[in-house]
Image (cartoon, grey):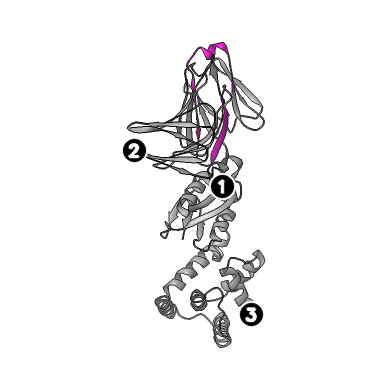
Amino acid sequence: MTQDQLYKLFIAFREGQISDDDLRRLKDFLNETRDEKLMEMMQSFVNMTSSETLSERSANEMYARIIQGINQPKVSVLQRRKNKIRHITAGLVAALLLIFIKLSFFPSTQKQNTPSTTHQIVAGRAKGNLLLDNGEVINLEKLTVDTSITLNGYTLTKDKNGEISYTLTALARSQSIYNTIVTPKGGEYVLSLPDGTRIWINADSKLRYPLHFSSSKRELELEGEALFMVSKVKEGDQDIPFIVKTGKQTLEVLGTTFNINSYSNQVYTTLVEGAVKLRYEGIEDKILQPNQQASYSPQSNNLSVKEVDPYYTIAWKTGVFAFDAMSIQSVMEILGRWYDFEIEYYRNISNLKFTGTISKYEQIDKVLSIIEMTGDVKFKINERRVIVM
């Protein structure tokens, strides 16, 4: 490999623009070198900005040292340790960067026989459990599409799109029967209620609902996140209100589209269309208008409302993640729920933001590489853990 080729490969790698073929060439070359020479080379790159190039003299000297290091017999263990200590002392940042590259991209011969763990983390899908009133549990993922199950007074159907719906008999309408859908991390589900309301239940969430509503109200309980498209229902001349209880928050609506997110210690309610009334103990009722988002803190019993673009809140329902200057930490929490992985932080990223739209069904390594293009953060995947650096 010539000097020009080597430096072009390093520049492409550092800028995240290296092709798969060039990455293999660089890997093969670096696996032949000694760590001390690599540290010298990497330190020069750490100390350079993206637009800088080495002078002809320094480039010639460094290339000569690296090539010499490849051809030289191995030095003693003691001398190697002394050299490593000297290089690490001279440039700790370069040493850490080298360790990251060697472990993440250029594994040893022993590790090359180990299958890549990247694709053990896969995108979520339609899955969850349905808890019946009698304690029975139905695994919705294993329930075949276009299948109906007859239960006590009602029929449960999973259509060709995987959506769950109900058909009630007179017996079911005369009883108080509750079902609960529980989605795990990496799962979601779509539910059609007997009144025509459709609900998209996001990952790591729980929704408890009656099969038949009373003539005075339609009340459900939510933990996690769900998007509701509520159908209007009348009893005579009176509209039957639709009520969603989320912890200490009670939402009342007649017919509208809204999203509730209660993953964190805040409850975020975003109104897409229509109108909803929010009720809390000790706080005046609040009516939301379209494109408004309410943020409620149960700990402080505090409520605030702001104008938002609902697209970024409900995009998950359409199969994409949409982020608008969202903190990297919040982005990682959303990805962690959907791809079902743990997160470990190796640096403070509280001030870093990300804006972009990404398919929910893209491979996790590609999703993370898109976020890395901000230039502010790097990721490493270790089994089912994503390390943020």
281 and 54: which one is in front?
281
Left or right of 268, for residue 68: right
Dot 2 or dot 3: first in sequence order is 3
Q: CA distance from mark 2 to mark 3?
A: 63 Å
Please name the residue that numbered disc 2 is placed on.
301
Q: Quadrant of the N terminus?
A: bottom right
Which residue is found at the position 32% from the left and 40% from the top?
A: 300
Q: Is residue 308 visible?
A: yes
Please name the residue that numbered disc 3 is placed on.
4
Location of residue 121 in the rendering, given as x and y in whole percent from the top left corner:
55, 49
As shown in the figure, which amino acid type bears the numbered disc 2? Asn
Which residue is found at the position 55% from the left and 73% from the top?
A: 50
Disc 3 crowd, CA 10 A, few/some/many (<14, 14-19, 20+): few
Dot 3 or dot 1: first in sequence order is 3
Q: Is residue 117 visible?
A: no
Mark 2 secondary-structure assignment:
loop
As shown in the figure, which amino acid type bears the numbered disc 1? Phe
Location of residue 214 in the rendering, given as x and y in whole percent from the top left corner:
48, 17
Please name the residue that numbered disc 1 is placed on.
321
User: Which one is closest to the eye, mark 3 or mark 1?
Assistant: 1
Location of residue 109 in the rendering, given as x and y in whole percent from the top left corner:
56, 65
Which residue is found at the position 58% from the left and 59% from the top?
A: 113
User: Which one is closest to the eye, mark 2 or mark 1?
Assistant: 2
Residue range corresponding to the magenta coloring:
166-193
Location of residue 105 in the rendering, given as x and y in whole percent from the top left corner:
55, 64
15 and 278: which one is in front?
278
